[in-house]
Image: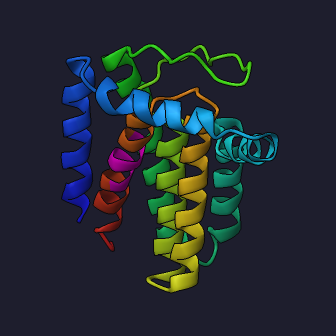
Amino acid sequence: MRWLGLAVFAWLAILVGRSQAIFFDEPIRDFVHRHSAPAWTAGLQVFTFIGAPRIIWPVVVIIIALGWRRHRRDMVRLGVVMAGALVLEIWLKLAFHRARPAAFLGLASPDSYSFPSGHALYAMCLYSALASITAGRRMLAWTAAGLMIALIGFSRIYLGVHYPSDVLAGWSIGWFWTRSVLVFKA
């Protein structure tokens, strides 16, 4: 299943590299923008905030600090997942240099590159790792993780600061990376 994440990312990388991802990016962006509403905007701005690196990183440090005594191996694995996510985000954004789309709702576009979405990448890595480490395959943990991942990623599309392909790329490479690290039980 993790290899599917890599395959999806590779497909998106080829499309973005050839400037061909727009065939599905624009219709999705147009649809989402046409259905925006003030209540949705307020709610999804909260999820964008929650998924921001300035929030994610302190949360990761706190989780690792709290779990270090009793779950050292799992906390090391979580640290490796998140450190790898940081390296992937920086390296991939620099490799692709994809410009941001024009943001919706009068928001300013961030200054960084667009591909892949760092919010989507970090959300996938953090929440899927936590669901794996803390709860194995329990439905509640995976449902909560899935909702957080989906809402954070969707918020980036809804606010217009990422193309849908950016978010899908963040999710897919994040899934591949997280599953690759967590496959080792050491």
The residue range painted magenta reads: 170-175
Colour approach in the figure: rainbow
- Can residue 157 be seen from the camera position used here? yes
Which x, y percent locates residue 179? 32, 62
- Is 150 drawn above or below residue 119 in the view shown? below
Q: Residue at the spot x=33%, y=33% of the render?
A: 24
- Is 74 drawn above or below residue 116 in the view shown? below
Q: Is residue 42 left or right of residue 109?
A: right
**Screen quadrant of the N terminus:** bottom left
* Res 14 quadrant in image: top left
Residue 165 colored in magenta in the image? no
- Is 186 drawn above or below residue 165 in the view shown? below
Q: Is residue 72 left or right of residue 177?
A: right
Which x, y percent locates residue 84? 41, 43
Q: Residue at the spot x=45%, y=36% of the render?
A: 28
Q: Residue at the spot x=68%, y=38% of the render?
A: 36
